[in-house]
Image: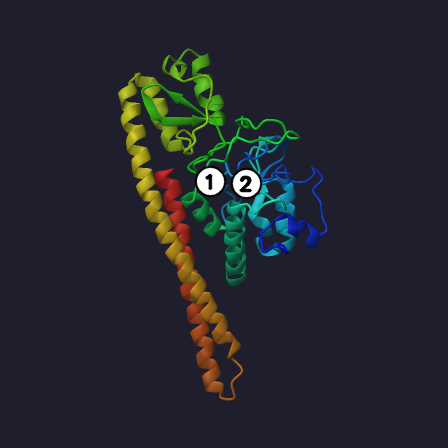
Amino acid sequence: MNQDGRHDVSLLAHVAGIRAQEGECPNAQLVSEQQQLAVAQRTWYTILDPQTGSQPLPGWTVCPSCVLNIQACCPAVASGFAPVHPAGPREASCALVPSDRYDDRRTAEILQQLGSCVAMAAMLRRPDLSQLVNWLRANLPQPRGTGTLSSAGPARPQGNGLCPMNYPSTTLRCHTMPGVPEFTVCEQCYANVIRADAARGVELATRFDMSPSLTPSGVTCQLYSDRMRRVWSETVATGNLEYLRQKASRVVSERRVKERELQTKTAQLQQQAMQLRLQAETQELTFLQPDFSQTTQLNNQAAMLKLQAAQAEDQIRLAEEEWRRYWE
């Protein structure tokens, strides 16, 4: 929080005394929320799950400058960010706005969630950004205004090869097929699957709109998972568009219901694990008792609390694995 009482990620750079080689955040010169996020060509970072190595929100990108500052000042979650796959420079926007010219509300909210993740990491003794991931999924960014920076040029839709997966993105473009509007396909999956099928003469693939477009309410990709790619392959093999329409509609509906259910379950388990860890640490702080039997009892209680916390964390991982295995 800066001297005006505003949350400002740019202050992290002053504290850390560091600068990214690729320069300051592209959004550093924004002056209001009426301006769209600036688009720039560079290497981008996203959230990494250190336990599985997966990137749950590849469509959510942060610039090297903001990541470097966060990692320097919040080492507990430093390993929670990694370059977006596939590696390499591309056009994208930073999800944070480190501007000292106005208070960006969403950046403040993200930093608050990140602070909670730092506290959780201290409890678990390992980085855990799942609270931020769940919050981002549940709180989509509002469409920004149409104003632009003259120095950055006009804001434009991003064609950066990123796949939003099941995280609704308002900045990534998608391809659609007339008659199956819910079957949205990101540019990356379109290039890898649909365009390849069209090139070998698959008639259904040629029905997709060749020019991708933005969706103000946010778009997810319906073709990133093995499950939906099998549905597409079956549709291509049979030529039955109705099969794709029914599957796409059903999968999207079921996935949204299950996602909300698992998010609620995960949030409750995270809260439970954090409380148990806190109780265990409180017990450990009172170990040094004159009565040895009392110390032993407190030690046993702390060990039991830690075991219960570990069990809650195992349930979180099982819920995440259930999502990846059966619902993606």
Which label's residue is closer to the chain start, 2 or 1? 2
In the rendered image, the quadrant that contains the N terminus is bottom right
Q: Residue at the location (51% across, 55% down)? A: 117
Position of residue 7 measured from the top left corner of the image (x, y, whole percent): 57, 52
Q: Residue at the location (60% across, 50% down)? A: 8
Q: Residue at the location (55% across, 26% down)? A: 156
Mark 1 is surrounded, within 10 Å at the Cα level, by few (under 14), some (14 to 19) or many (20 or more) other residues, namely some
Is any part of residue 128 visible from this angle? no
Kind of residue sitting beneath label 2: Ala
Badge 1 marks a residue whose secondary structure is loop
Residue lying at the far bottom in this picture: please name it: 290
In the rendered image, the quadrant that contains the C terminus is top left
Residue 41 in which image quadrant: top right
Q: In the image, which disc is placed on residue 243?
A: none
Position of residue 32 measured from the top left corner of the image (x, y, whole percent): 56, 40
Mark 2 is surrounded, within 10 Å at the Cα level, by few (under 14), some (14 to 19) or many (20 or more) other residues, namely many
Please tell me which residue lies in front, 265 or 238. Answer: 265
Residue lying at the far top in this picture: please name it: 201
Position of residue 105 measured from the top left corner of the image (x, y, whole percent): 51, 47
User: Is 267 located above or below residue 213 in the figure?
Assistant: below
Please tell me which residue lies in front, 59 or 302. Answer: 59
Badge 2 marks a residue whose secondary structure is loop
Residue identified by numbered label 2 = 95
User: Is 115 located above or below residue 196 in the figure?
Assistant: below
Residue identified by numbered label 1 = 141
Position of residue 261 measured from the top left corner of the image (x, y, whole percent): 32, 48
Q: Decide if residue 247 is on the left or right side of residue 111.
A: left
Q: Do the residues labelled 2 and 1 touch (CB within 8 Å)?
A: yes
Q: Decide if residue 293 is on the left or right side of residue 125.
A: left
